[in-house]
Image: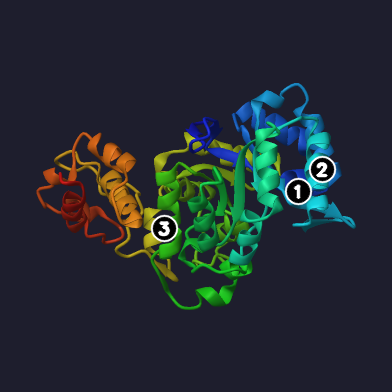
Amino acid sequence: MRYRELGNTGLKVSEIGMGCEGFVDHEGAYTQDLMDTADRCGVNYIDLYMPNPGVRRLIGEALKGRREKFILQGHICTVWKDGQYKRTRVMEEVKEGFEDLLVNLGTDYIEVGMIHYVDSMEDWKRIVNGPVMEYAKELKAAGRIGHIGLSSHNPEVAMAAVESGLIEVLMFSVNPCYDMQPAGENCEDLWDEKNYEGQLLNMDPAREALYELCSQRGVAITVMKAYGGGDLLDAKASPAGMALSAYQCLHYALTRPAVATVLAGAHTVEELELSAGYADAPEEEKDYAAAFASFPKISWKGHCMYCGHCAPCPKGIDVASVTKFLNLAKAQGEVPETVREHYGALAHTASECVGCRACEKRCPFEVPVAENMQEAVRVFGR
């Protein structure tokens, strides 16, 4: 297992994390086995959105004696009412739900307190200007949560949250199909078949700008729906018109700017072991470039995917990194100091490009690399 910085939090998290699907399935019968497997495989980041007290108690039992091995992302504003999950903004329910989380987990703190499911700008404004955010701040000040996070499917809402400077972790849906869809307040539009009937071209600008902003601000992204609820693994269900492998989906998410961990949906021990095996999988099993280039319904033509197929450069330029830093600067409309420093630390910069275009011949997405190198020289001065 490999580990990454969780943004600016100071925490180190496993590239592969775990959602709580498997804890919910089969009335929680797999909970102990899943936690044992996570421990054995080095999976240390776990998302706990499910408010069912019984599920939480089983997880708490499985955490006994090894709480310090795991980094928990618990949700604020998710409660169990009338025998089912509910999202709430009623403060009495919000507080009761959080207290229930800690009690049933058998802990007095969680590392990340995730404000749950904010997909409309109106909802975000209520949260940021109201008691929910104040409560999150109080929990952090008291040491009951280490860091404030927010979960969303809407890049415009997520952007506003990141720009506020109040959140340190963003839980966001990331996969090559959802990344094509424009911002919206109804998350079901992301997987609605009608939105994939015509060919889609390139990443939605709002999503690209969001990832770049998170990278620049040091806000970590924890990924949900990397498999699109399993649809991307099934040729008949895939919005792209063809199936991807689990490792291709994971690799796509993990090569997006600011992504720290992918919360792989694991319904069984075998599924968790498969996802955890990503680090040791051969590079050809992770490589998504050829598959993306042949999608019948989606085109990434002209868009750098940071896949690395442009290498090797005869002058040693890390073309993917140069392009990533260029995109960061373009997204900000200026060159942030941190981006300039990272660019300056490259062993070879865009100014060394001789325009041979060998990289362009290898690029599956027909990216105009030589033009990007020229633009990078204009932006960074070298």
Tell me if residue 81 can be seen: yes
**Which residue is tagged 1?**
50
Q: CA distance from mark 3 to mark 2?
A: 36 Å
Q: Amino acid at mark 1?
A: Met
The quadrant where residue 300 appears: bottom left
Residue under the image location 55 percent in, 44 percent down: 169
> Are circles 1 and 2 on residues that touch, CB within 8 Å?
yes
Q: Which mark is residue 106?
A: none
Q: Is residue 245 left or right of residue 129?
A: left
95 lies above or below 302: above
Circle 1: is it few (<14), some (14-19), or many (20+) Cα within 10 Å? many
Comes first in the chain, label 1 or label 2 = 1
Q: Amino acid at mark 2?
A: Val
Q: CA distance from mark 1 to mark 2?
A: 8 Å
Residue 171 picture location, percent across and down: 58, 49
Comes first in the chain, label 3 or label 1 = 1
Comes first in the chain, label 3 or label 2 = 2
42 lies above or below 304: above
Q: Quadrant of the C terminus?
A: top left
> Are circles 3 and 2 on residues that touch, CB within 8 Å?
no
**Which residue is tagged 2?**
55
Q: Is residue 187 left or right of residue 90?
A: left
Residue 362 picture location, percent across and down: 24, 53
Q: Amino acid at mark 3?
A: Glu
Element at label 2? helix
Q: How many marks?
A: 3
**Which residue is tagged 3?**
208
Q: CA distance from mark 3 to mark 1?
A: 29 Å
Residue 135 picture location, percent across and down: 71, 45
Element at label 1? loop
The quadrant where residue 369 appears: bottom left
